[in-house]
Amino acid sequence: MRDERGAGSGLNPAAVRTLVICPTICPGGGPPGYTYNLRAGLAELADDPLLGSTVRGIRFLGIDLDNRNRATGTAPVSSHQASTLSGVGRIAARARVALRMLNARAALRRTRKIVKRWRTIAGADIVVFQGYQPAGEARWARRCGKTVVYMPHTPSTFADEARMMRALPGAATPLGDREYREMHANERELFAAAEVVVFPTEHAADPYERAFGNALASRHIAYVLSGVEPPEAPDSDAASRNEVFSGGTTSVLFVGRYVPHKGYDLFLEAAEQLARDGVDASFWTLGDGPLKRHSDEVTDLGWHDAPHAMIAQADIVVVPNRIAYFDLLPLEAAALGRGLVLTHVGGNIDQLQHLPDSVGSTPGTVAEAVRMAISLKRASASWGQRNAEAFDREFTHVHMARRWAALIDEVATSRRDGRSRRR
């Protein structure tokens, strides 16, 4: 079964208890950033006359972090690994954990935490797992009669994502075949435990259909368009004081991880080609990652936990993914009225359809797409503004929260109807 979420409607006659689980919750990308935006959007719907009852029954389970998530694609952190530690700090932390595990009191405290967590799950009717996690809790929730919902978040299966990340320079060890199979089997179990599987769009679901088609065939598939909290654009005085890009040339910006599937290298190659061709533009990167390299034609700004001030100053934001899920960064750039270049892959295909001031390309034709975007921006200084209008109509965090509340409302109704038929 497949459906697509529009704006929510319908009155839930009795509040359902819903628990949303994400190991960490913080601004940025990946499951932590998605869950952060979802929670913020739901908070604004608590008094909604149609969905307020459903919204007030939603709780979140995860560790709140302050820093912007880098969406590295590594395994989810556990509660004792959540803080950001240096290499030495991580070694010391592991030693302390090992010592505590030998201590009976520490073992008892850990057991109590686990029991408390499982009691929290037991108190819910619907349990939503945001992103790849150990499948044990999902299986247990299903056995306890909970309706389990799972939403994956990586552009390919989690095992494929982990293999890509672990093959990059600086990674501790490559992902071995055994560990790969274990990750793949764990994600298959997540799909098996779920009655409902959520994707942002059909294009975002394609890699999962290929890898887990049999498991998905018997699941209810729902499509819930993503959204983000509108980023605050700096006021004109602050922008002039902190100006990064020169106003005399078109500024073209890449934002994100410097990894293969984000197309960081494709952006550098496009910038270098356009510079050789004499195109009058400046090229910039904002992020970090293992593929980072010097380019005479590109200025690297490094990683910033609050990138929106710089995105707001750029003329064009380039998203040259080789593979894509449904990235939140293009939505943030759209909210700030930036023109976009996106490759025709995964959820980018849908974003190109929704965001009119955008240019599409293949991974092999990024330079030509950027050239076209530069021409469009020079022809009209307002190019990009229609993206902001589309964002306001469809992609705020409240729009996404409304779609989720509507889905939970329908899942709750189906759950009640199923129980009534069994009586």
Image: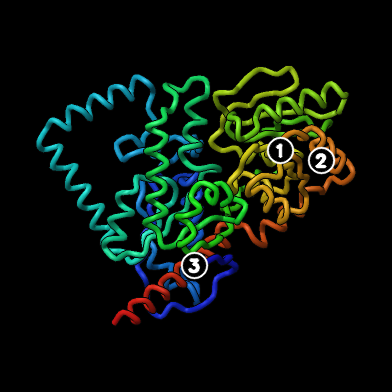
Q: Amino acid at mark 3?
A: Leu
Number of the front mark, 3 or 1: 3
Residue 141 located left or right of residue 264: left
Q: Which residue is mark 3?
A: 407
In the picture, the disc for residue 137 is: none
Q: Secondary structure at mark 2?
A: helix
**Residues at discs 2 and 1 in contact (Cβ within 8 Å):** yes
Task: Tell me residue 131's x, y (percent).
Answer: 44, 48
Is residue 267 visible to us here?
A: yes
Q: Earlier in the sequence, mark 3 or mark 1?
A: 1
- Between 194 and 341, the residue placed more toward the observer is 194
Residue 93 located left or right of residue 162: left
Q: Amino acid at mark 1?
A: Val
Q: Which residue is mark 1?
A: 318
Q: Which residue is mark 2?
A: 373
Vertical comparison of 347 with 281: above or below: below
